[in-house]
Image (tube, rainbow, N blue to C red):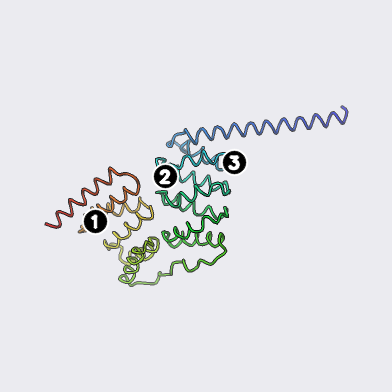
């Protein structure tokens, strides 16, 4: 075969193969999009919607950002919203910043918020700085240290003053509890947990401290652990059942479950009336 025509043939063949590969990739991503938006949240192995969302994130194709962002609605499960945030963070583009910041500020799932915060380690968008500076007060020691690294990378400033002190050798429960209550009043719920957790390591059955811990957990959107503590307190001899029901009502309000919240508030009033008689 003439060398000239042979080169034309090879070039045409390679172009054809590459086009076919692109078409196959597009078909694959279209299937992922269908799963992400219309798949089930439940499955024997992995929910199909989660598979689709993960697939779109791994593609790092920014054209799928709007479709992924549309799944960040409140009625989506915690699992779905967390997976969406993880997928958006893989895009590593400032186009996703508004969705990440919205999650940190408004989402009701602790792990989704934390995942969104860590995304700014690879997305150097300075709009995140004031949001992270506020959010960091809701974090405990380990998570706080990780977000401080992100903040320092974004701003070039030193945030070591926001690190929590080492209290691993402190055995003064009264002092630890007082510090926890002071931090709670300031709205620093991560710091509250830092001190109250140490107090509970020393006196694990102190119900007043368990109640304070549950209240702080609600305010950092850790609903699972807070609900467990409230439930245990209701089943115990904790005297202030009214306050526990009030806490459960606040928890359900934060989750957007207003009917359940109303039932808890009714119980809070019922027990308050009993104690006042």
* Closer-to-camera residue (195/237): 195
- For this orientation, the residue located farthest to the top is 1
- Taking 159 as reference, is 168 left or right? left
Image position of 41 with respect to 136: above or below: above
Return the x and y of residue 150 as percentages of the image width and height: 53, 59
Q: Secondary structure at mark 2?
A: helix
- Taking 152 as reference, is 23 left or right? right
Which residue does the numbered mark 2 point to in the structure image?
Answer: 78
Residue for point 43% across, 41% down: 73
Residue for point 58% across, 39% down: 63
Residues under labels 1 and 2: Cα distance? 27 Å
- For this orientation, the residue located farthest to the left is 277
The answer to which of marks 1 and 2 sits earlier in the sequence is 2
Numbered mark located on residue 61 in the image: 3
Classify the position of the C terminus by image quarter. bottom left
Which mark lies nearer to you, 3 or 2?
3
- For this orientation, the residue located farthest to the right is 2
Return the x and y of residue 205 as percentages of the image width and height: 28, 62
* Closer-to-camera residue (65/98): 98
Classify the position of the N terminus by image quarter. top right
Residue for point 77% across, 30% down: 12
Q: Are marks 1 and 3 in contact (CB under 8 Å)?
A: no
Q: Residues within 10 Å of mark 2 (few under 14, many from 20)?
A: some
Residues under labels 1 and 3: Cα distance? 49 Å
The answer to which of marks 3 and 2 sits earlier in the sequence is 3
The answer to which of marks 1 and 3 sits earlier in the sequence is 3
Return the x and y of residue 212 as percentages of the image width and height: 30, 60
Which residue does the numbered mark 1 point to in the structure image?
Answer: 243
Q: Quadrant of residue 213?
A: bottom left
Residues under labels 3 and 2: Cα distance? 24 Å
């Amino acid at each position: 075969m003439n060398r000239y025509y042979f080169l034309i043939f090879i070039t045409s063949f390679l172009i054809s193969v590459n086009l076919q590969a692109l078409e196959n990739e597009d078909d694959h991503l279209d299937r992922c999009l269908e799963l992400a938006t219309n798949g089930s949240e439940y499955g024997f192995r992995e929910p199909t919607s989660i598979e689709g969302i993960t697939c779109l994130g791994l593609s790092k194709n920014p054209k799928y950002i709007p479709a992924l962002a549309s799944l960040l609605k409140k009625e989506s499960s915690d699992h779905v919203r967390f997976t969406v945030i993880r997928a958006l963070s893989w895009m590593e583009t400032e186009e996703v910043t508004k969705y990440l910041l919205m999650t940190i500020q408004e989402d009701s799932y602790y792990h989704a918020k934390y995942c969104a915060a860590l995304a700014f380690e690879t997305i150097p968008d300075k709009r995140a700085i004031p949001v992270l500076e506020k959010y960091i007060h809701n974090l405990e020691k380990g998570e706080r240290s990780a977000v401080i690294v992100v903040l320092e990378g974004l701003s070039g400033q030193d945030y070591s003053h926001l690190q929590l002190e080492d209290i691993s050798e402190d055995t003064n429960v009264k002092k630890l509890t007082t510090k926890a209550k002071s931090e709670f009043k300031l709205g620093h719920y991560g710091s509250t947990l830092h001190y109250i957790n140490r107090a509970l390591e020393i006196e694990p059955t102190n119900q007043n401290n368990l109640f304070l811990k549950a209240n702080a957990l609600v305010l950092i959107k850790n609903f699972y652990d807070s609900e467990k503590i409230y439930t245990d307190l209701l089943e115990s001899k904790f005297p202030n059942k009214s306050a526990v029901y009030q806490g459960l009502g606040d928890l359900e309000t934060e989750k957007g479950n207003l009917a359940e919240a109303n039932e808890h508030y009714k119980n809070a009033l019922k027990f308050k009336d009993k104690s006042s008689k």
